[in-house]
Every structure is written in C-alpha cells, then in structure tokens.
Amino acid sequence: MTTHQFPAALPPAIELHGLSKLFRGGAGLHPLELQIERGEIFGFLGPNGAGKTTTLRTLMGFLRPTSGSARVLGHDVWHEREAVHALVGYLPGELTLPAAETAAQVFGEAARQRGAAGVVANAKMLCERLELDPTRKIGTLSKGNKQKVGLVLALMHAPEVLLLDEPTDGLDPLAQDTVLTLLQEAQAEGRTVLLSSHMLAEVERVAQRVGIVRAGRLVRAERLDHLIAGLPSHLTVTFRGPAPTLPSESALGLTDLYWQAPTVSQGPTLRATLTGEPNPLLRALAGAEVAYFRLERASLEEAFLNDYRSQNAVQSGQEEPHA
Amino acid sequence: MLEFTRSWLRGARGSLLWWSVGLCAYAGMLWAFYPSLRGNTGINDLLKSYPQSVRDLLGGADLSTPGGYLFAELFSFMLPLAWIVLAALWGSRAIAGDEEAGRLELPLAGPRSRGALLAGRSVGVLLGMLTVGAVTGVGVWLLGLLVSSGLGLGPLLARTVLLALACWVLAGLALAVGAATGRAGAALGASSALGLALFLMYSLGGQVAALRDLRPLLPFWPALGGGALGTFGWPEAARGLALLGVGLALPLLAIPLFNRRDVGK
C-alpha cells in the first residue's frame, strides 16, 4: 500500500462536521463526522437507502445540509459549490445522459465547461482503456457502456477528488478491473477517491479505509486492514482418530462449534468460528492426529452482512440467528 | 454560460424543426384555400352577419385580401395558441423537466454556477422562440408567393417575431417557476394558464370596456394590436425589446431561489 505524505497545512480532502440532511418524515442523513485524507481511497458501504447517495449529493452541493458542514479540499460544499466542482469528478448513482448525442459530444461540452488543456485527450485515452466507442449515440449504448460514459466524464479532467456512486454498476468483469486500476492510478498520483459501492470485493481490493452507513448513520469507519484483522475465521479440522479433548471454547476463541460424526474413511470433523489469534487452538491441537485443517478468514461481505443482520435483530428485539 | 445555450439548442433541434415545419405546413394549407376567397366580397357580407365579438376575434379583417385572410386564419387564433403551448413546454422542460428526468446533475456537476445554467438555457429558449418565429415568418411569406399574396416579408416577419417574443415572456415565466420550484408541472401550468388568460383578455378586450384600456399593455398587443393592416416601426421594435427584457428578467429573478433549494430527483 502506498502512503502519501502531505504538508500539514493542507486541509483534508473531505471533512464532514455534524453534517446532516433530513427529509420529510425524518429519513436522510443524521449528523455525520468523517474525515478523508488526501490520497486515500475510502470505501463507503451500506444497503439501499442507507444514506450513501444522499451523502454524495450533499457533498456535491445538490442538497442543502440541514445542519453541520462539509468541506472538500477546504471549500464549503454549499457556499463554494463552483470551487468544489472545479476540483471534483462525480459519477451519480442514477446516470441520465442525452440519448440523441454521441459520447464525444458530451465529452466535448464537459471539456469546454472545464476549460483545461488536455481534457479531451484524456477523455480519448480513457475511452480506449475502457473500450468505449465515443462516436456512437448514447441512446444506442448498453447500460455498461453508458456507465463508461459517466466514468469518463468523472475522470477526464483528472480531478483532485473523485466522488463515485456505484462506479462499476453494470460493467463486465474486465471493465470493472480497468476501473479499479484507474482508481489505484489516481491514488498513486495523490488524488482522493470516495467510493460508494455495494460491491464489497472491489472496495476490499482498493480501499484503505471503509465507512459503513446504516439508516443514515455512520456506524463504523476504520482502516480496512484493521477491519479485516478483526474478522472471524471459519475453522474446519478433521481428525484421523477419535476426537481429542480440547480446552473450553472460550479459551480457544471458538464460537458456533459443532462436531460432525466420523465416517468410514475419516474421523470426526470439528467446525467452528474462530475470533482472534489461532495460537491457543494450534497448541491444543499439537498432540492430535489431524487429517485435514482449514482456517479461512470471513470475507468483508460476510462481515458486512453479519453486522447488518445483528443490528437488525437488535433493533427488532429478536435474538440474533446463528449463521 | 454559452455552452449551456449551445447544448440546449442542440437538444431542441428536433423540436424546433418539427414545430417550424408543422406551422409552415399549416400556413401552406391556408394559402391553398386562399385563391377561392380572393376578391370574394360575399365572405365579408357573411362576416358582417356575425356578432361583433366574433368579428373582433378574427381581427375585424377583410377576408378577401391576403393580409386580412392571413390575420384571421393564422394570427388571430392558431399561431398565438400554438406558441403559448410551445413556450410553456420549452420553458418548463429547460430546468424543471430535465431535473425531474434526472438530467440536471451532470451539467450542474461542472464548475459553472446554477445561475449560469439558468441564464444559458434561458437564452437558448429565447433563441429557439426567435428562430421558430423567423422561420415561420419567412415560410409563410415564401408560401404566399405561390398564390401571389403580394405581402411584404418585412411586416410579416416583424409580426411573427413579435408574437414569438410575446410567447417568450411566458417561456420566461415557465423557466422562473421551474427553477424556483423544480416542478415541471407547476411551470407548465402557470405559464400556459397565464398565456391563455392573457390571450383571452386580449381577444375580448375589443368588446369588454374594462379590458379595452388594458390591451396595449398585454404582450400580444405589439404583434396583433395593429390588426390586419398593422404597420411596424420603432414603437413596435421598442415594445419587442421590452418583451425580450421582461422574458429574460423573470428567470434571472428566480436565480436566488434556484441557488437556495435542493436540486435533482
């Protein structure tokens, strides 16, 4: 992972202080505190309606904050909208483009608005990398290709900050890979990405930190490697002989433990979820005849889903179901 | 700002073309009937049997002359109504319609202000209305040549452009309401209802004493007030400029409201 050093005087890429945006009926975004440093890829996770898009649209100055403030590279997102837009590339979650125009016409217009040199050449390069034909009318393009048009519009002026709402939505795996590579390249140049996504695998691949938003509240924001280190692992141990006597589950850091009966060809199988260091377990197994051993870390997706299920269960007053 | 004007005009090309073609086709149809009425004084005798209010609606024109026939058949009713609808549609779609369709976020994601977008698109709608006015004027004149109408291009063009400017004021209102509220339905309703009410006031003004003095203040007066034999000079040009200014002022006045509200779907 690349770490970027910046002078302390420079403001963070994105800072939210008590930012809220409440709609009629109380839905929306509740006061949010978050800081995203320059050169960081920050994954913004949450289910539909959690408030991810509202956060991005508020950062773009499309929605007026109900309270608090948000700044992008030191500029207030509501009062200095144009200054923010000059520095930001934005991909909306629901992209609607003029069907009768070609992608090249749309890029040309955006380039004239930006007025910076090299924007059109950059758009051409991005089209080549994303394998997008800019001469075709947008109305004739597939969903994935329309998404590529939106991505080129967001990236073509090499913005300092990228606000991307589901950037790989509708893309084939090859194009998804290219987009993630482009984001990593942007980061290598010191630029910042706020990546809102349902695709946890892609967030896991590129993000340094993630924020999990739920019902308009940021319930977790931490480094991805810390989050992953705290994830439980799935344990499977098959023994050759009879099952050994093991210390208590809690001493080994095991939960959800159960034994699978021996078969003709193999001994009993232990299945459990391991949280924390595996050393106590390995020591306990030292004298046993182990035929098969597998310890697999839960994916971010699994952790995310479990997190949500447990919070839903707590909220509805039900007992948390075991996986 | 001009990039918004250019892009709006590019998007409105088809609409502009078909409205112009449609109105010219309608004018062509009218001219095709004209030879049967040329010099026919009987039609005027028939008109005299109508109530004064109906004759006023037809501009009190002599239907046997090319100018009178065109005024009664095209300018007194059909063209104003068509352009009221066109102005309300274009004005309401330019901001609020695009916003409801989710097409406003991309232009607003650039480094230009909301005010620049509103001003740029307003100029686009104005140019669109002027183009439809000019193309219709020239088209009616050219088609009139086929029946030797003898009408001058200048007065005809002046009348269509002034009528387009009268309707542009309604487009300006639709732009303002759309920008202030983000609701295309409200913009369309407000501008078309006001347009129809003003046109009704203008049409009935000849008969209703209370409205008679108001007629010169109505936006349709510069184009239609002179009747079939209207002449066009500096006073009409000044009134045309006033209409242009009022139509531009309305969306500009809405900029603070547009700036203060949430945008997008």
Image (tube, rainbow, N blue to C red):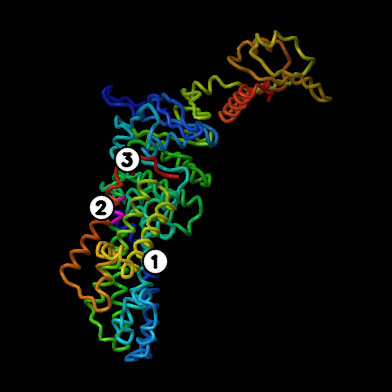
What span is colored magenta in the figure?
B118-122
- The residue lying at 42 percent from left, 55 percent from top is B189
Quadrant of the rendering where the C terminus of chain B is positioned: top left
Query: Residue B264, image x and y in percent?
Result: 42, 44
Looking at numbered disc 2 in the image, what kind of residue is underneath it? Answer: Ala
**Left or right, residue B258 beside residue A228:** left
Q: Report the mark closest to the observer, 1 or 2.
A: 2
Q: Position of residue A211 (x, y in %)?
A: 47, 27
Check disc 2 and report the residue beneath it. Answer: B249
Tell me the chain of label 3.
Answer: A
Residue B94 forms part of the magenta stretch: no
Asked if labels 2 and 3 share a chain, the reply is no
Q: Quadrant of residue B43?
A: bottom left
Q: Amino acid at mark 3?
A: His
Residue A218 disc label: none
Secondary structure beneath dot 3 equals: helix
Answer few, some or many: residues within 10 Å of disc 1's Cα (few below 14, many 20 plus, some between 14 and 19).
few
Asked if residue A264 is positioned above or below residue A249 in the image, the reply reads below
Q: Which residue is mark 1?
A: B14
Give the labeled residue for mark 3.
Answer: A85
Whole-angstrom CA distance, mark 3 to mark 1, is: 31 Å
Q: Chain of mark 2?
A: B
Give the Cα separation between the discs numbered 1 and 2.
27 Å
